[in-house]
Image (cartoon, rainbow, N blue to C red):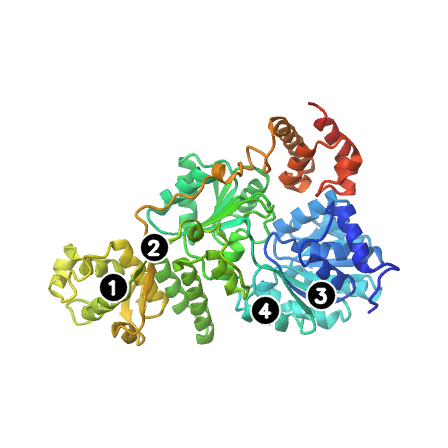
Amino acid sequence: MSAVLSPEPAISTALQVLQQVFGYPAFRGPQGPIVEHVCDGGDALVLMPTGGGKSLCYQVPAIVRHRAGRGVTVVVSPLIALMHDQVGALHEAGVAAAFLNSTLDGDEARRVERDLLAGRTVLLYAAPERVLTPRFLAQLQSLHERGLLSLFAIDEAHCVSQWGHDFREEYLGLSALAEQFPGVPRMALTATADAHTRADIVERLALQGARLFVSSFDRPNIRYTIAEKDDPRRQLLRFIRDEHEGEAGIVYCQSRRKVEETADWLKAEGIPALPYHAGLDAAVRARHQDRFLRDEGLVMVATIAFGMGIDKPDVRFVAHLDLPKNIEAYYQETGRAGRDGLAADAWMTYGLQDVVNQRRMIDESEAGEDFKRLQRGKLDALLALCEAHDCRRVRLLAYFGEASLPCGNCDNCLNPPATWDATEAARKALSGIYRFRNAAGSGRYGAGHLIDVLRGKRTEKVAQHGHDQLSTWGIGADVSEAQWRGVLRQLIALGHVVAEGEYGTLALTDSARAVLRGEVPVRLRQPPEAAPRGRTRKERGTAGAGKAPPLPLDEAATERFLRLKAWRAEVAREHNLPAYVVFHDATLAEMARGQPASLAALGAISGVGAKKLEAYGSEILRLLAED
C-alpha cells in the first residue's frame, strides 16, 4: 500500500485536521506517531489510558484517509452509548459519521447503509455482532472491491482476551477481518492490557505485524486513596460530602442488591444517586445512563456492567465499596474519573471479606487451573497495592512495567502510614487455625471467631466449643481487632491461609509452615485510629464542576462562565446531546477567562474547531461581551 496519501506528509495533513476539525493546537504524547503510522496504512496496537485521547488516534486518520479517497473507517465498539456520543460529537465537529445498532428502525438503518455504500460516510460505528453478519460483511466486501474500505479500528480490544478482565466472546470472530479484507489497515485500542492480554490480542486479532504503541499509564490528576472498611457507607458519605458535594461520580459495588441498597441510602442522605446493573430493564438502564451523561452532580451506583466507553469528562470521583478482581479492572474503572485532566479521586474501601470472596470466586469457577493460577496472581498484585505503605502510584505503574517516582498525591504520600512487625502475630494466627483442627466441633472456623479466641473475647460460640481452653486463647490480646484483620488479609493474600466454603472457614496451606517457623517476615500497615481526612476540594483548589468553574476565575469571569454554561445547556437540549459534547467545561472556562472579542481569537481556544466556530461563534462573542 502506498505510504503517501497526498503531496504533503500525512502528519501535516493530520495536524491540519486536528486543528480545523477538533480545535486542538497539537497532538498529545504518542498521538502524533500513532496517527502518522495509521494514516500511512500501518497496523497498530495502541495501549493508552482512559482520558489519553484514544479516539483521536483513529478519528483523525479516518478523516485524512477519507479526504484522500480511501473511503470509510469502521469502528468496532461493544457500547451503544459510546457510539451515540461519539457520533453526536463528530456531527458537532462537521464530520459525516453514523452508527448501526439496535436503536435504529429499518428506514434509519437503510439510510445509513445507502450513505455507507455511496462512500459518503467517514466513520461508521458498529458492534462486533453486527460487523460479523453476512449482510454487513457483504457490504464491506463491496466497499473493499471499490477501494473504499479505509481502516478498521477495534476499540476495547482487551475484550478479545480470555486473560483480560472483560472477555467478550463476540470479539473472537474479528480475526476474520484480516482474512477477508487483506490490505486494509487495522488498529486495536485498549486502556489496559498486561503482557498476557497483549499477546492474546495480537494472536486473536492476527496483529503479528502491527506496531505496538504503549503510552504512559500515569494519570497524574487522579489521587488514589485506599482505606480499610470501617462502616463503609459512612466512609463513602463522608468522602462525598467532604470532597465532592454536588459533583458527578461513580460508586462500584459487587452485587446488584448492594447497588440498589446503596443508591437508595445515598438518596435518603440527600445525595442524588441512581442504580445501574445488568438485572435492570434495558429501558431503565438506558434512561439512567442518559441522565448520568446529561445531568450535573449525579452519582451512579453500579456494578461493572456500567462504565466502559463512558466519555463523560467531568466525573470527579470513582469509588469502590468492594474489591475489584484485579489491577487492570481497578485501573480502567478508576480511569473514568477526571477525563478532562482536572483533579479527580479514586477512592476505595476493602476488607478481609473482600479477599475471602474474591478467592472463593476464583477457586469455585469452572475455569482451568492455569487460568485460576493467573487470576490468583492478579488478585495478589491488587492486594499488595491495597496493603502497600509506599506510594500507590509507583506500585500501580510498576504493575504495567512503568518506572516512576513517588507522586506526592496519593494517600500514602500525603499521610504516610505507620507500619508494624506482624511476624509474631502471623505465627499466632496460624497456630490458632492449627489448634482448631483438633478442637471440638467442625475443626474449622471463620476469621471473626479466630480473632475472638486470639484476643480472649468470651462469646457464646467460644463457650459452646470450649475454645477458651485452647493454648492460643488470649495470646493476641495486645493486638487490636483491626490489626488482626490485616494479618489475616495478608496471610490469605500470600496464600498461607485459604478461606473455604460459603462461610469462609480458614485452613492452612503447605506454605504456612515457613511462616510458623518464623522464616517469612510479615510487615503491615498500622490501622489508623480514625481514617485521615483528605484535603477537601476547597483546600485542593478545585471547585465543584457542577457549581463553579474548573479553572481559577475572578468574579466577572465566573459570571461569564455561568452564562456560557446556561447557553450550552440550551444548545445541548436542542441537539439532544450531553452538554460536554458541545463544549467541555475547561473550554468554556478558557473563553470566560480570556474573553476573546473576535472570531479569530475565539477560534484559537483549545476545543473550538472550525464547524463549532461557524455555528456558535457569534453567539458566544455576544455572551462574552455582556459585561
Q: Quadrant of the N terminus?
A: bottom right
Determine the secondary structure under disc 2. Answer: loop
Sooner in the amino-acid sequence: mark 1 or mark 4: 4
Position of residue 20 measured from the top left corner of the image (x, y, whole percent): 78, 46
Horizontal arrangement in the rendering, residue 517 relative to residue 165 (left or right) = left
Residue 35 or residue 65, whichever sits in front: 35
Q: Quadrant of residue 592?
A: top right
Looking at the picture, which amino acid does disc 2 mark? Ala
Looking at the picture, which amino acid does disc 4 mark? Arg
Looking at the picture, which amino acid does disc 3 mark? Arg
Residue 186 is tagged as 3
Determine the secondary structure under disc 4. Answer: helix
Reading the image, the residue beneath label 4 is: 198
Sooner in the amino-acid sequence: mark 3 or mark 4: 3
Residue 423 or residue 624, whichever sits in front: 423
Q: Quadrant of the C terminus?
A: top right
Mark 3 and mark 2 in contact? Answer it, CB < 8 Å. Answer: no
Is there any visible trace of residue 577 in the rendered image?
A: no
Q: Disc 1 versus disc 2: distance between alpha carbons?
A: 17 Å
Reading the image, the residue beneath label 1 is: 425
